[in-house]
Each structure stands twice: as C-alpha cells, then as structure tokens.
Image (cartoon, rainbow, N blue to C red):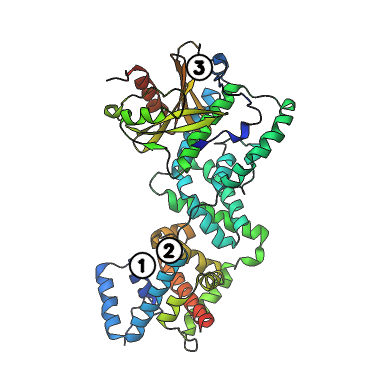
Amino acid sequence: MTRPLIYEDSTLPIHAYLDGELDPTNALAVEKRMATDPALAAECERVEALQCLMREHLPREAPPPGLRMRVETAVGMRRPRAQLSHAQFSWRALAASIAVTAVVASGATSMLRAPSRTDLVRDGIVDAHIRSLMASQPIDVASSDRHTVKPWFNGRIPQAPRVVDLAKEDFPLVGGRIDVVGELPVPTLVYGHRKHLISLTAIPAPGRANSAPVPRTVDGYNMYRWVEDGVAYWAVSDVAAADLDKFSELFRTTPPDQ
Amino acid sequence: MTVVSLHSRGALRTKGHLDDGPGQDFDQNPRIDNDKDMALGQDDHARFARLVLPHLGDAYSLARWITGNRADAEDVVQDACLRAFRAIGGVGDGSARPWVLTVVRNTAYTWLRKNRPSAILAVEDLQVVETANAKAGDPDSETPETALIARADAASLQAAIMALPTAYRETMILRDVQGLSYREIGEVTGVPIGTVMSRLARGRNQVIKAIGRTES
C-alpha cells in the first residue's frame, strides 16, 4: 500500500476534506479511500461528531456586556464617565440603582462643575442613539408611513414632531421612539440611510430664534443641531457628515404635507 | 421607551420643562472639539467602528481560549483594540477579521509571557510534542465510538480543549468555533497551511481521545 508522501498521517486529509479545504479531485480521492477503508471512514465519523459537538456547545458568542463600552473609552470614542467606568455592569442593575444614585448625586452636585444644559442634552441624545442601536429594536413604532408615525406620538407626549417623507431622497422613514432626556420624554424619529440609522430628536425650545444646522462630533458620532419654529432638532448618526448635512437640509426644507 | 442620560441625572434637575440650553454656548463656543484635530480622529474612529468593533465577540472568545480566563480576556481585548486603533490607518477593508484576530492573538501571547510564563509551551517543546505524536501512530490509545463523542457534554468538551497545547487549541478554535479558512488561520497564527492542517488533526484527535476517557 502506498501513501501520499505529503501526509505522514493517513487521517490528515480527512480533516481537510471535512473542512471543505480540498479541491474536487482530492476530495474524490478521499471519498474513494474511505469507501474501501472502514477504519478511515470511522475516523471521519468521529471527527464529524466532534465538529457537531463543538457547534452545539461552543457557538460564536457576543462580547460580554460592558466590553464594547470599555474598548470605546480606551480608544477615545467615548469620554470616560465615573459611573460607567467599570466593565462589569448590566443595564438592569444600573436601572435598579438609578433612584439611589439620583438621591446621592443630588447632594453632591454643588461640589462639581455643573455642565451646561446643552452638554447634558447633547450627551443624552447621543446616549439614546447608542442605546437604541444596542437594543433589539431601535424604535418603538415601526412604520415608513408618516401618517402612522405622527399619530403614534399623539397621546404619548404633548407635542408630536413634524414628520416628513424623505424616501425619494434615500432617507426612508423607519419609525419613531420616545427618549427620555433629562426628565422629559421627547419624540425621536428614526430614518434610514444605506443600512445606517439616523436619530432625529425634537425638543421644545419656545422663544428660541431659528438657526441653521451646526455640525458637531460627539463620541465618534456626527451630530447636527438647528432650531426651527420653537423646536430644537438634533440629528445624530454614524453616517458621514456630508450625508447628515444633506439629511438636515432636506428635513428643514421639505414641507410635511407633500 | 428608552431611558437615557443616566450619568447626568443628578446634575440635571429640571422639573417638567426642558430648555435645551443657551444656544450660543453650543453654537459659538466649540469646546467639545477642535475641528482640525477631530477631522483626523473622527476618520480613525469611524474606521475602528467599522473594521474592529464588529469582531469584538470573536476577539474576546479567542482571548478567553488562549488565556483561559474571562477577566484576563477582557484586559487582552482592550489592550489589543488599542494596538489595532493605532494601526487602523494602514489596514485594508477586505480582511479585517483575520487582522483583528492576529492582533488579539499576539497581545494574548505577550500577556501570557508576562503574567503566566508557565502556560506557554515554547516552540521547541511543541515540536517535541508534535514529533512524539506523529511517531506514536496511536497503537495503544483507544479511539472512542462516534456515539460516545456525540453524547459528551459541554463541560468535558471544554476541559478537553483547554487541556490541549495552546497552538493546537487556538487552531481548533479559529477553525471550529470561528470558521476561519486554513489560509486565514495560517495568517493569524503565522504558520504554513500544512502546519495548520496537522495541528488541527492532532488537536482534534487528542480531544476525541480525552472525551473517550471521560465518557467511558
């Protein structure tokens, strides 16, 4: 009996065969050898059983909670935050501790430099966008029809946002959700753009003068803010700044009833 | 409903009405970022988010199998991501996953050498093991039946894989858990495809025999 010179172990090609790494000619040769060699066929079965076992018991896994945030902080995509700096935390545990934290923190805030409200609103909106991307659903109401999305907000918050249809411009409406920024529930519209999502949050700003969109980058996300008719709009997304600029301009200039 | 802005709840105590702040603070005082500096960082961050972050699960899994420990794996991944971030400018979009895993693997070995020198089998030792295995021809060791392998539970499977020399273990994980091709595994572990194949065969054979010993 002759063996191929390249293999010092006759079972070696079995593995390449099962892994789909052999070309058709060599795969056929392995199959022929197994047909006449029961020991080789049995070895093939065992390896196959092991592969099944590994697929069953050792699936590919998601990173543990907190690791992504830790990595993003390490590379500077996210500013370190005292309460979130430890890798080991769960959203559920955090939620349970909010009440306690709020009470404790309220006594201590006088000692800290108070961040401006704009900073807090901005952070809150970016957090809401990031959180929505981590959730199984980035939206509370899923619809591409603005006549479905707008009424959904009515009855949930005092003022439903302006909703425009930008599907023709490649910014299809995906749906909407309610975020809580500070302590106020605010409406957020979600638009899509080439597999990316854009969160557009509308915050009442009575008495504020209209302003044109101003770009910013926060935690690696692009952000545009503008004021129109007593409402401050915040658009946040990981799409390119140019796309978000186009989106902001389109949203501002498209009348809702068209 | 999405609850956000948890970190700032203490400081933000507006009741019922939320003004979004003095506009000039935001519009005219750009202290969040300096546009020139950010242009560069923003691009790197975007590339990092696109090329590295999607593979965090695989990175963590490989680090855990090499270090054998969850907390160590997280430290290794963080360190590896920092290295990857510094090199992100020179990486092509096409082969991000093998590249990320290569950085993680190298970081894990550096970490092991520093913290657990005993856990690493030197290359010469491995060659001795490989030669011994190749010459043994397995005359004395019993090979278990297929049904026995299929019945094994997760714990004995993991124990059997953990008992492998690191080089066999990482090769098996890259192939059977993460689904890399032989060529990609060769890239990540820095060996020729023939070596990938023989490490895979020996690793699997040892695991099969270890399962046979614990299950029978």
Query: In front here: B112 or B6?
Result: B6
Which tag, 1 or 3, sits closer to the chain's start? Answer: 1
Question: How far apart are labels 1 and 3 at the CA level?
Answer: 61 Å
- The disc label shown at residue A205, or none: 3
Classify residue B47 by image quadrant: top left
Q: Amino acid at mark 3?
A: Ala
Q: Residue at x 52, y 82 (%)?
A: B213
- The disc label shown at residue A19, or none: 1
The kind of secondary structure element at disc 2 is helix
Query: In front here: B57 or B13?
Result: B13
Badge 2 sits on which subunit? B
Other-residue count near label 2 (Cα within 10 Å), few / some / many at <14 / 14–19 / ≥20: some
The kind of secondary structure element at disc 1 is loop
Q: Amino acid at mark 1?
A: Asp
Q: Residue at x 63, y 39 (%)?
A: A98
For the residues labelled 1 and 2, say whether their Cβ atoms are less than 8 Å apart. yes
The kind of secondary structure element at disc 3 is loop
Residue A67 horizontal/vertical position (percent): 56, 48
The answer to whether residue B41 is seen in the rendering is no
Classify residue B31 by image quadrant: top right
Q: Amino acid at mark 2?
A: Arg
Left or right, residue A47 beside residue B108:
left
Residue B160 horizontal/vertical position (percent): 53, 73
Nearest-to-viewer mark from 1 and 3: 3
Question: How far apart are labels 1 and 2 at the CA level?
Answer: 8 Å
